[in-house]
Image: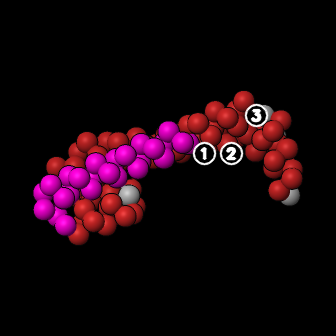
Amino acid sequence: MTETEIVEIFLAHQWWSITALVVCVIGVTLCWFGGLMAALTALGNRRWVWGIATIFLGPITGIPYALKYQEAEYARSLMLRGVWVLLVGLVIAAVILMLGR
C-alpha cells in the first residue's frame, strides 16, 4: 500500500479520521500534563533527578516515577488515562485503514 493510497483512505473517511486525530491529541495532552504534574511532585518531594528528567522527557520518565512512588497518584491517573485514550485513537485509525482497503 503506497502513501497515496493511505491518504486517499483517510480522506474517504474524513469524519472518522478527524475523530481519531482529536482523540489522539487529547491522549497526548493528558500524558504531557500528567508528566508535568509528575515533575512538580518529584521536585516538591526533593527527588531532583526524577523531577529534572521528567521536565525534559515528560511521560517517558513521568510514568515510571508515578508507578514507583505513591505521592504521584494524580499524575499517574492522568498519564494512564492519556495512554488509554491515545490507544483508542490509534485503534480507530487502524480500523479506518483496515476497512478502507
In this rendering, would 24 be left or right of 37?
Answer: right
Q: Are marks 3 and 1 in contact (CB under 8 Å)?
A: no
Instruction: Write down the residue under mark 1.
Output: 90
Q: Secondary structure at mark 2?
A: helix
Q: Secondary structure at mark 1?
A: helix
Q: Which residues are magenta?
A: 24-48
Quarter of the figure that contains the C terminus? top right
In the image, farthest residue toward the left: 45
In the image, farthest residue toward the bottom: 49
Q: Are marks 1 and 2 in contact (CB under 8 Å)?
A: yes
Spatial CA span between label 3 and label 2: 14 Å
State the mark number for residue 94: 2
Residue 99 lies within the magenta run? no
Q: Does label 3 or label 1 sit earlier along the sequence?
A: 3
Instruction: Say above or below: 100 vs 59.
Output: above
Residue for point 41% across, 50% down: 32
The amino acid on which the numbered mark 2 sits, given as a three-letter code, is Ala
* Residue 13 screen position, x and y as percent: 78, 34
Q: Is residue 63 among the parts visible in the rendering?
A: no
Spatial CA span between label 3 and label 1: 15 Å
* Residue 94 screen position, x and y as percent: 68, 45
The amino acid on which the numbered mark 1 sits, given as a three-letter code, is Leu
Q: Does label 3 or label 2 sit earlier along the sequence?
A: 3
Instruction: Write down the residue under mark 3.
Output: 14
Residue for point 73% across, 40% down: 96
Q: Secondary structure at mark 3?
A: helix
- Judge the density around disc 1: few (<14), some (14-19), many (≥20) Cα neighbours within 10 Å: some
Instruction: Say above or below: 18 vs 2.
Output: above
* Residue 68 screen position, x and y as percent: 23, 58
State the mark number for residue 58: none
Q: Main structural element of the magenta stretch: helix, strand or loop?
A: helix
Spatial CA span between label 1 and label 2: 6 Å
